[in-house]
Amino acid sequence: MDIEVYGVVLVPTILGLVEVSKRVGLPDKWSPILSVILGLLAGILLLFPEDIRQGIVVGLALGLSATGLYSGAKNINEEVRK
């Protein structure tokens, strides 16, 4: 399977894991850090176990994308409620 397909699947997966963590008790301020950590783990362990540098770069992109997706949806939801 191509990296593009994994990337499409992993971003919402990371987002979902962070949301579950928040519902279990993780403070909101730690959500972006958990998102980046999960992205790094996915990049290194799942996508590029043979090339750690590439896994770090892709993992950072995954984690930061999940953070941005959450932040964007949250901002839109706050605007709609006004």
Image (cartoon, helix red, strand yellow):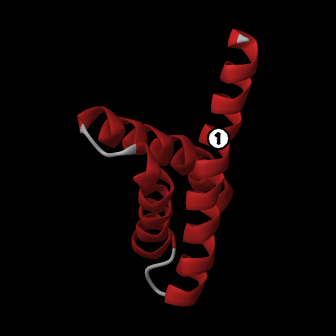
Few, some or many residues within 10 Å of mark 1 (<14, 14–19, 20+): few
Residue found at x 46% / y 86%:
50
Q: Is residue 48 above or below residue 27?
A: below
Q: How many marks?
A: 1
Residue found at x 73% / y 11%:
82
Q: Residue furthest front?
A: 82
Residue 81 image point, x, y percent: 68, 11
The residue nearer to you, when weighing 75 against 13, is 75
The N terminus sits in image quarter: bottom right
Quadrant in the rendering for residue 23: top left
The residue nearer to you, when weighing 69 against 76, is 76
Q: Is residue 48 above or below residue 15?
A: below
Element on which disc 1 rests: helix
Residue 2 image point, x, y percent: 63, 60
Residue 47 image point, x, y percent: 50, 69
> Residue 67, can we see it?
yes
Q: Residue furthest left?
A: 24
Q: What residue type is disc 1 on? A: Ser
Q: Residue furthest top?
A: 81
Residue found at x 43% / y 44%:
28
> Residue 2, can we see it?
no
Is 36 left or right of 45, judged from the image as shown? right
Residue 65 image point, x, y percent: 65, 53
Q: Is residue 2 above or below residue 25?
A: below
The residue nearer to you, when weighing 32 against 1, is 32
> What residue did someone put label 1 on?
71
Residue found at x 49% / y 42%:
15
